[in-house]
Amino acid sequence: MPYNPTTVANYFISKYARVGSLTPMKVVQLTYIAYGWYLALTEKTEKLTDEHPAAWDFGPVFPSLFNSLAEYGKKYITGVLPNAVGNNKIADLDKKFLDVIWNKYGRYDGAYLNAITGQENTPYEKVYRAGYNLTIPDDDLYAFYRGHMEKVPAN
């Protein structure tokens, strides 16, 4: 069952906020990257979140997660976010997956993660049009991350 993007973000926040500097941009990017890898690893049979990411002017984002993070601006996140309705309990196997994502990408700041998710030939870059907030198709995310399977995040 897919999770609300804020639930995924709260996992990163509750487990890693004290060991890593978590800004809203970093949390959004980690959630987006996890979403893409999840599609690739499950062969699109399952989705990590119940919301699709969108290509906004400042990078890929989950709109509901962005709204949950609005109060922080560019400041470090200090506590879990209010959660929207949905599946709020992350399964143990998904926790392990999110830990692998953290181990691979958690050392980078939000600006760096945003830069790599917005590079040429990424799903974001393919659909981005200034001012339009278009949905990033799962097929594009799947193809991109599936094409990078030799770089599968390892624990």
Image (cartoon, rainbow, N blue to C red):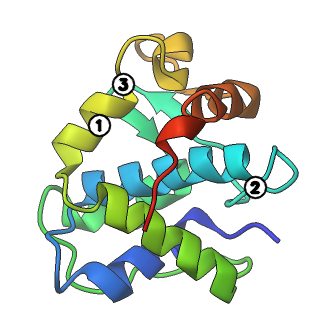
Say which of 50 and 119 sits in front. Answer: 119
**Residue 40 circle label:** none
**Pointer 3 residue:** 118
Image quarter of residue 142: top right
- Position of residue 142 relative to residue 76, above or below, is above
Picture coordinates of residue 149 (x, y %)? 59, 38
- Position of residue 1 relative to residue 67, above or below, is below
Q: CA distance from mark 1 to mark 3?
A: 6 Å
> Along the horizontal axis of the image, is 131 left or right of 48?
left
Say which of 70 and 16 sits in front. Answer: 16
Is tag 2's residue or tag 3's residue first in the polypeptide sequence?
Answer: 2
Report if residue 88 is visible in the image.
Answer: no
Element on which disc 3 rests:
loop
Contact flag, marks 2 and 3 (Cβ < 8 Å): no
Contact flag, marks 1 and 3 (Cβ < 8 Å): yes
**Residue 47 circle label:** 2
Q: Quadrant of the C terminus?
A: bottom left
At horizontal 47% and vertical 40% (from top left) the residue drawn is 151
Picture coordinates of residue 108 (x, y %)? 19, 52
At horizontal 68% and vertical 70% (from top left) the residue drawn is 3
Q: What residue type is disc 2 on?
A: Lys
> Along the horizontal axis of the image, is 154 left or right of 59?
right
At horizontal 66% and vertical 54% (from top left) the residue drawn is 38
Image quarter of residue 78: bottom left
Say which of 95 and 136 sits in front. Answer: 95
**Pointer 1 residue:** 114
Q: Residues within 10 Å of mark 3 (few under 14, many from 20)?
A: some
> Along the horizontal axis of the image, is 148 left or right of 71?
right
Is tag 2's residue or tag 1's residue first in the polypeptide sequence?
Answer: 2
